[in-house]
Amino acid sequence: MQTIGLPHNEYDFHSYTKARRELIEAKLAEFLSGKYPSALWESMRYSVSGGKKLRALLCLASAESIAGLNQEIDLVVPVSCAIEMVHAMSLIHDDLPALDNDDYRRGKLTNHKVYGEAIALLAGDALLMLAIETIIEKTSDKVDRQVLLKVISRFTQAIGASGMVGGQVLDLDFTGKVEDLRKIKNNKAELEAVESIHKGKTAALIKFSVWSGAAIVGANEKQLQLLEEFAEKLGFAFQIADDLLDSTGNLATLGKTPGKDQAANKVTWVTLFGEQEARQMLQKLAEEGMEILKSDELANNQNTPLAELLKYAIYRTN
C-alpha cells in the first residue's frame, strides 16, 4: 500500500469513528422511530442500518475541523443523519430492477428483495422527505436560520437534477458506450464522460457533507471553498476506489455483487483506463487533497479526521 503523507495520528482514529457512528446510529433510530404504516417504516430502517456512514462522518469531521474536536458536533448531527437517509434512499432506488437490479447491499438482501419493489420505492421517497424534515425540525435554534436555509437549498441541489439524480441519468446514458468512447481516441472526451457521472452520482453528496458541516459551525467563505475542493477530490477518489473494488472484490468483502460494471459495460475510470491508471489517479487525488488541507486557511485547524477519512475512502477494502 502506498502512503500519502498523512500527518502522525494525534488520536485513535478507530475510536473516533466508532464513537461518531454510534452517535449517528442512535440519532437515526430516534428520527426513524415511526410505527405506522409498519411495513414502510421497517423498510426505511432496514436500509438506513449498517454501512460505513462515511458521509455523516465527513459532515461531523468537517465541523470539527473548524470548531475543534468534540466541539459543537451536536449542531450538525441532524444534517449528518439527513445525509445518511438520502444516501440510503439512493441505494434503495439504485438496486431496483429498473436500474442496477442488484440482490445484495451491505452484505444482506436489497430492500426490494425483502419488502417488494413497491414498498422499496416508497421507502426511498419517504426517506428523502424525512431527511428534509429532519434538517428543518431537529437542527438547534443556535444555528442561524439564514445559514440553515442555505443548507437546505444546497442539500436539494446535491440530490436533484444537478447532483445525484442527474449523475444517475448520465450513468444510464453512458452505459454500454465504453467502446464508443475508446474509438474516439480522445482522452479529454473520456475524462469528461467519467467525471460528469462521478461528480453528480457520488461527489455531489460527499461535497455537500463536507460543506454543510463547516457552514453550520461558522466557517468563512475561503474555508468553505477549500473544503469543497477537498471534498470534490475525495468524492471522485471514493468512486474510483469503488470501481476498483467492483473489478477486484467479492461478495463477502464488498457486501454487494461484484463485476457488475464490467458486465453492464458501464463507463468508469477502470473500464476506460484500466486498473493501473485508476490506482495512479487515486494517488494523485490523495496528494492533492492533502495539499488543500495544508493551506494557510485550514492548516491551523484540526484536520486529522478529514485526512484520515480521505485515506480510508481511498484504501478501503469494502
Image (cartoon, rainbow, N blue to C red):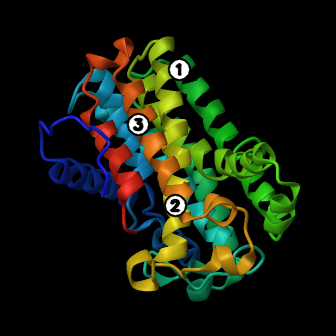
Up the image or down, 177 lies above or below 228; here it is: below
Q: CA distance from mark 2 to mark 3?
A: 17 Å
Please determine whether, in this image, residue 290 is positioned above or below residue 13. Answer: above
Q: Quadrant of the C terminus?
A: bottom left
Provide the secondary structure element on which disc 2 rests.
Answer: helix
Dot placed on the residue nearer the N-terminal end, 2 or 3: 2
- Residue ranking furthest to the front: 185
Say if mark 2 contacts mark 3, CB within 8 Å: no
Q: Position of residue 152 (x, y in %)?
A: 60, 33
Amino acid on which the number 1 mark rests in the picture: Gln
Q: Residues within 10 Å of mark 2 (few under 14, many from 20)?
A: few
Foreground residue among 246 and 276: 276
Q: Residue at x 63, y 58 (%)?
A: 269
Between circles 1 and 2, the one closer to the viewer is: 2
Crowding at dot 1, Cα within 10 Å, few <14 / some 14-19 / many 20+, comes out as few
Residue corresponding to mark 3: 287
Image location (x, y in percent) of residue 291: 39, 27
Q: Amino acid at mark 3?
A: Glu
- Where residue 243 sits, quadrant-wise, is bottom right
Residue 225: mark in rendering: 1
Q: Is residue 263 placed above or below 63 in the rendered structure?
A: below
**Mark earlier in primary sequence (3, 1):** 1
Quarter occupied by the N terminus: bottom left
**Identity of the residue drawn at 47% across and 32% down:** 230
Does the CB distance between marks 3 and 1 fall below 8 Å? no
Q: Position of residue 149 (x, y in %)?
A: 60, 25
